[in-house]
Amino acid sequence: MASTSPASLAKQLLGILYKDKPRLDRIDDYLHGRHDDPYMPETADAEYKLLARRSVSNWMPLLVGTPAQALCVDGFRRGRPGELPKGNDGAGLPEWDHWERSRLGGRQSAIYRGALSYGHAFALTEKVKGRVRSKGLSAMKTAALFEDPANDEVPFAALTIIQSPRGDERGIARLWDARNEYRVTFKSLSDLDSVKVQNGRRHGSSECPITRFAALVDLEGRTIGVIEPMIELQDRINQTVFDLLIAQTGGSFKVRYASGMAPPVKRDPETGEPILDENGAPQPLPVNLNAKRFLFSDDADVKFGTLDETPLGGFIESIDMSIRHLAAVSQTPPHHLLGQIANLSAEALLAAETALSRKIEEFRRVFSEAWERVFRLAAELAGESASAEDFHGEVLWRDMEQRSLAQSADALGKLADQLHVPKRGLWRRIPGVTQNEIDDWEDLREQEDAELMLAASVRRATAPPAPVEFSDAPAA
C-alpha cells in the first residue's frame, strides 16, 4: 500500500504538477496567443518571420468565453424545504451568506474559465477569521489525489503552490488531507528530495476542503477542456493565414516587365564613358518606377508586358472552411466565429444555438455537483449540521437566453392561468431578475398582504349593521 504520510503525499502531488506542467503550459500558451510558428522554409528571412507572427489568429478565448458567459449561479435551494428559515431560493440561508461573503457572484466566472481552459479547476473552502470563505485555485498550481479519479467527488489529498521557487528562495505550498493542513517547502518541482513538510493543524472539515471543477472527466479519470482538442485546428488556421499573407505580400499585385532593354548606367560626366565596378561591369542606375510613370523605348525589339497577380480567393475560402470545422468540432455556432448573421431566420439561429445549449447544459450538470459540495463544506464549517448532510440541495442557474420581456410575460401568464403554476414560483423565470430582487418582492408581497388584511378588517369593523326587515304576515 502506498504511503499516506504528509511528506509522501506532498511528493506525489508535486510530482503530478511537474508531470502535467508541459501540457498545461502548452494549453496556456495557446489560450494567450503564443502559438507554434507555421511551417516556413529553413532559410526564411526576417520578412517571413514577421508575417508568421502576424498570422496568429487566436480563436481560443472565444471557445472558452462563449460557454463561460452562459454559466452563472444565481441562487441555492435546499433539499429539505420544511427546515428553511425563509423561502426556498437561498434567502436567509447560511450557504448563500457564505456565497455573498466570498464574492463568488463575480469570482465564479474565473473558476469556469479555468475548468474549461485546462480541463479542471479547484475551489478551497475554509474558515478565515471566523468567516467561512471559498476561493478558486488554478489548475497550473494545484493538484489533487483521488482513490478513484473518475468517480470520486472527495479528494484524498490536495496541494496548491502559493509561492514558486526563485533562485535560492524555496517554494511554498499548502497541503490538505482529510483532517489537517500542512505547510510544504521545496526547491523545485523536479527535486522531490528537497520537499519538507511542517507539522499540521486541523482545518475544521471532516474531509479534504478542496473541490474539483472538471469540465469533462472520462472513465480513466482524465480531465479534458475545450482548448486542447482544438490546437491542431488552430494551427491549420494559422498556416492558411500565413500562406495568405505570403501571397498577399509578394504576389497580390500585377508585375510589369520589359525584355530586350538595357537599364541606364552611370557615366563619367566628362568623357561620357560608363563607370565600371570592381568586376569591370557597368553600374546600372536605379529606375524610379511607379504607377505614375511609363516605360518606353525607341528600339523595336524591346517588349513590354505584365504578370497577373495571385488570386487570394482560394486562401480566404480555405480559412472560412477551417473556421467552420472549428465551429462544428467545438459545438460553437458558426455565426459566433464568422459574424455572419445578416440573412438568418429565427429558426436557423435557434438550430445553430442548439448544440451550444446542450454543451452548456452538460457543464451546468457537472459544475452543479461541485458547487453543492462547496455549500455542504461551508455549512459544516459554519456549524450547520443539517445542511452539511443535505445531499438534495441544488444550485440555481440564471437563464442567460435573450428573450424580450413581452414574450416572457406572455409565456409566464399562460403558465399561471392555464396550467395553474404558482405565480411566485415563476418569478425566477423573469429575464434578468436577481435573487435580491426576488427577496425584495417577497417582503413587498407580505407587506401588501398585511395591508390588504388590515383594510378588510377595518371595513368589516366600520360597516353599518345590516337593516332588519319586518313582515306583516301572521305567525304560524
Image (cartoon, rainbow, N blue to C red):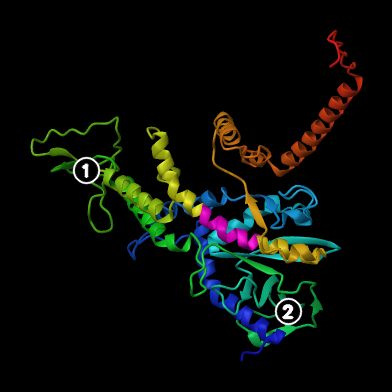
- The image position of residue 120, as x and y in percent, is 57, 65
Residue at the far top in the pictured view: 472
**Residue closest to the far bottom:** 1
Kind of residue at badge 2: Val
Residue 42 magenta-highlighted: no
**Magenta includes 368?**
yes
* Whole-number angstrom distance, CA of label 2 to CA of label 1: 77 Å
Disc 1 packing (10 Å; few <14; some 14–19; many ≥20): few
Closer to the camera, 148 or 266?
148
Q: Which quadrant of the figure contains the C terminus?
A: top right
Q: Is residue 266 among the parts visible in the rendering?
A: no
* Residue at mark 2: 184
Magenta span dominant secondary structure: helix
Q: Is disc 1 placed on a helix, strand or loop? A: loop
Q: Which residue is mark 1?
A: 263
Q: Amino acid at mark 1?
A: Pro
Left or right side of 317 for 79:
right
State the image quarter where residue 463 is shown: top right
Q: Nearer the viewer, residue 212 or 13?
A: 212
What is the magenta range? 361-371
